[in-house]
């Protein structure tokens, strides 16, 4: 990584100590493994194997791992990233949904005693139990992964909502989704996903990744995003569920004003009272949800609860 790249990404490069012939993340080695095991890609699982070692360096560097820390990888594929994690972290657990990849991973990672592969669906696993069993003896844990596009948001929200003892989440995801997570109020990318992620984390886009560095190549470009978990949420709210429902309602129809979207949340009979509530909170009712900060959403949510418009309201 160049000095310019270090300044731009805010991470330090990590170089693998493995000989080049052992690295999975090259076009030649990846194709050899696929051919050796007769592996065929399942489009339904969003399988795209990374073949660029420089991108792997940036991912692992962003995770800030050392021998005292653990890493949870979701969707290891044939182990390209897993190899690097095993070299940097004290303990690595990789969860793979595709049972056809389990024997490949066990062969590739046979010389990595600090690494365990689990066959399972991370969306169905009891992650708190997994953390207790796998990471009891480490000082901190980060999730580091190349996530399938089709389940990016459900996986990330599960990790955040379950309040796992995480330091960082460093994941490669679709570029547009990464931009939405890191977006600030006022732009077209800013929405309910931005608020949800930033409530729990401080996001940083580490780098963009062209579609050409994967086998097979996806149709869109990717980005590596680093989510650093906050010690406490960005704003204080009396009811998290209600807060997120208010946020979702505010973005229900992006072209509508805040008062129009929230009227659908509280009922037409409360429109006038809702308008007064917004004005008391120094929020113009004709603003749109995309212009509101987390602090403003928190004020609205708290005031709506005080008014009796609680989390049982259907939207």
Image (cartoon, rainbow, N blue to C red):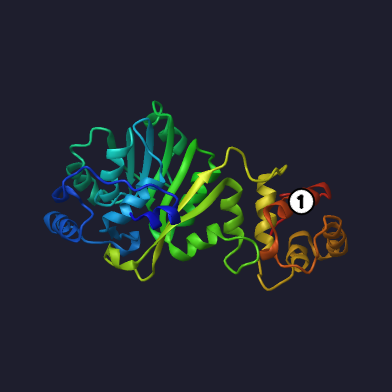
Q: Nearer the viewer, residue 85 or 297?
A: 85
- In the picture of the structure, the residue carrying the numbered disc 1 is 299
Q: Quadrant of the N terminus?
A: bottom left
Q: Is residue 121 visible?
A: no
| Residue 56 left/right relative to 177 | left
What residue lies at 74% left-to-right and 60% top-to-bottom?
Answer: 265
How packed mark 1 is, by other alpha carbons closer than 10 Å (few <14, some 14-19, many 20 or more), is some
Estimate the x, y position of residue 206 in percent, counting from the top left.
44, 55
Q: Residue furthest left?
A: 36
Instruction: Please state, as top left, top right, bottom left or bottom right, where the C terminus lies in the image.
Output: bottom right
Give above or below for 160 relative to 257: above
Q: Measured along the vertical axis of the image, is residue 135 above or below residue 266?
A: above
Q: Secondary structure at mark 1?
A: helix
Residue 132: % across, % down = 43, 29
Q: Position of residue 229 (x, y in %)?
A: 53, 42
Viewer-proximal residue among 98 and 219: 219
State the residue at coordinates (54%, 62%). 180
């Amino acid at each position: 990584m160049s000095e310019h790249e270090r300044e731009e990404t805010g991470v330090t490069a990590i170089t693998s100590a493995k000989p080049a012939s052992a690295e999975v993340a090259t076009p030649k080695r990846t194709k050899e493994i696929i051919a050796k095991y007769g592996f065929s890609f399942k489009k339904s699982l969003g399988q795209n194997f990374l073949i660029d070692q420089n991108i792997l360096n940036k991912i692992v560097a962003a995770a800030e791992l050392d021998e005292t820390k653990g890493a949870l990888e979701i969707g290891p594929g044939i182990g390209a990233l897993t190899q690097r994690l095993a070299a940097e972290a004290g303990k690595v657990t990789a969860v793979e949904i595709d049972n056809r990849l389990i024997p490949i991973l066990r062969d590739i990672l046979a010389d990595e005693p600090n690494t365990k592969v689990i066959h399972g669906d991370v969306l169905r696993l009891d992650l708190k139990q997994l953390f207790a069993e796998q990471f009891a003896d480490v000082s901190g844990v980060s999730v580091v992964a190349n996530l399938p596009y089709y389940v990016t948001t459900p996986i990330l929200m599960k990790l955040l909502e379950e309040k796992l003892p995480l330091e960082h989440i460093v994941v490669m995801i679709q570029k547009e989704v990464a931009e939405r997570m890191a977006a600030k109020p006022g732009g077209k990318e800013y929405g309910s996903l931005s608020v949800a992620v930033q409530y729990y984390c401080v996001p940083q886009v580490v780098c963009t990744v062209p579609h050409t560095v994967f086998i097979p190549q996806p149709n869109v470009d990717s980005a590596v995003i680093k989510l650093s978990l906050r010690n406490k949420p960005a704003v204080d709210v009396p009811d998290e569920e209600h807060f997120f429902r208010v946020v979702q309602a505010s973005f229900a129809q992006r072209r509508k004003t805040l008062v129009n979207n929230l009227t659908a949340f509280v009922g037409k009979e409360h429109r006038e009272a809702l308008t007064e509530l917004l004005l008391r909170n120094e929020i113009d009712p004709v603003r749109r949800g995309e212009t509101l900060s987390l602090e403003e959403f928190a004020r609205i949510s708290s005031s709506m609860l005080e008014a009796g418009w609680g989390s049982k309201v259907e939207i």
